[in-house]
Amino acid sequence: MILHRPISRRHVLRTGAAFTALSALSPARMAMADPTGDPFVLRAASGQAALRPLPYGPTNVWSYSGSVPGPEIRVRQGDRIRVLAQNGLDEGTTIHWHGIRTPNSMDGVPFLTQDPIPVAGEFLYEFDALDAGTFWYHPHQRSSEQVGRGLYGPLIVEEADPIRVDRDLTWMLDDWRMTRAGQLSDDFGNRHDAMHGGRIGNSVTINGEIPERISVQSGERIRLRLINAANARIFGLDFGDFEPVVVALDGQPVTPHAPDGGVVVIGPAMRVDLVIDMTGKPGEAVTVTDVFYEGLEYRLVDLVYGPDRLRDSVPDWSMDLPPNPLAEPDMASAARHQIVFNGGMMGQMMMGSGMGSMMDQMREGNMWFINGEAATGHMMDPLLVLPQGTSHVFEMDNRTAWHHPIHFHGHSFRVIARNGQPTRYREWQDTVLMAPEERVEIAFAADNPGDWMFHCHILEHQAAGMMGVIRVEPGTTKT
């Protein structure tokens, strides 16, 4: 059941005043964490959500505090974040704070940084918001199903001196595999999804809704925070006649620039902050189209201008965000490590001594491998042990036929090269999207001690073995 109209090319629509009284679709429930009072409570439980518009009925989901997405937690850089996670599910769970640097004990990875929160149990997460930016939260316990059923929400850390805009909006993008009855398909964890591109849904939402139109105002400047919460879908958003400017990737500031080819590509777990000037006329509408999968393009939403004009010209306000206090890798002393991703349907196998081991692991049900090893069981030996305070380059080689958004817990890294060519912006990220057969080099300073997950964020790939541990051995951090 496809709930979006297919579209073959961008188009601009003219519309009347009847379309102007529209929702901005920023998350309706926002909370400020209070560092001096009681912690903010997030309760994971089953419930219902109106994912589809009327006259369709509600869909059974799992959610935080009764909403999909969960409440937007918005704090200022430097604030203390205190969240009491309560488990109202019938199974264990955790909360991982994706992209934001936390102490290892607060990272929310079951059996590695904490035990799962038991049924009817709770766990207090407490850490400082070191970096400003766009982050999010989700479980890391059976995440392919728990996230896929709706457990996620935005975490926004505001800069002390943010860039000037008229509106700051958050869009959490997700897709859902729904039945004709309007409920979630219960085929989580199936082998076909795991061997191929993961669980791709047939209904796409923005902040838990399937929107027709979103209202904008002629002349306004919007900061649009995009978060991809989908299990596996990659979005490639074409904003039509708009000229979006990328100002941050994965929460970290980047040199303001136009997206390649005019399309904003955002893989699972990734975030992109855009600045968009609404340069159209009152009464017009522009279609935002997802064009990532060739032949499967569809209209995501129409941005519709209201009857009033805020200003007549584009403001000359700066789009440069202040940098976060990240440790710069020392490229002169950086150690190099080869990381090879194998497996999946039509993937290359590792040759030599590792091939027999991989075949044995495949017979045990594993499908994806990092350096010839699939993650099995609850505890894993570290893939690498890195002394704290040292710098490293990972030469990552995707020897598979599928995309992989590779996420590193506890650290951000610079993306320094793709297929041997230096990147233009040396962007900081925590999740980098690798195309099939692509080679990507990342560089980082190992300054956050502990055992950190390193995995593909197509959650079915992670569950089927594409996951490992990087240990940062505690010591005296070099300066």
Image (cartoon, rainbow, N blue to C red):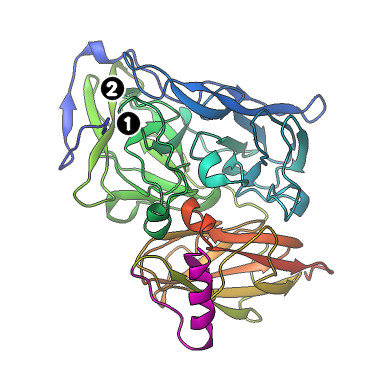
Side of 98 where 388 appears, left or right? right
**In terms of secondary structure, where does tag 2 sit?**
strand
Query: In the rendered structure, which segment of residues is drawn in magenta?
Result: 346-369
Image position, residue 366 (x, y; %): 51, 64
Label 1 Cα crowd, 10 Å radius (few <14 / some 14-19 / many 20+): many
Q: What residue do we see at 37% from left, 58% from top?
A: 196
Residue 278 is tagged as 1
Label 2 Cα crowd, 10 Å radius (few <14 / some 14-19 / many 20+): many
Q: Quadrant of the C terminus?
A: bottom right
Image position, residue 336 (x, y; %): 59, 80
Vertical order, 385 against 244 (above or below): below
Q: Quadrant of the N terminus?
A: top left
Q: Nearer the viewer, residue 260 or 462?
A: 462
Q: Quadrant of residue 403?
A: bottom left
Q: What residue do we see at 38% from left, 16% from top?
A: 57
Residue 142 is tagged as none
Q: Are marks 1 and 2 in contact (CB under 8 Å)?
A: yes
Q: Quadrant of residue 206?
A: top left
What kind of residue is marked 2?
A: Tyr
Residue that mark 2 sits on: 305
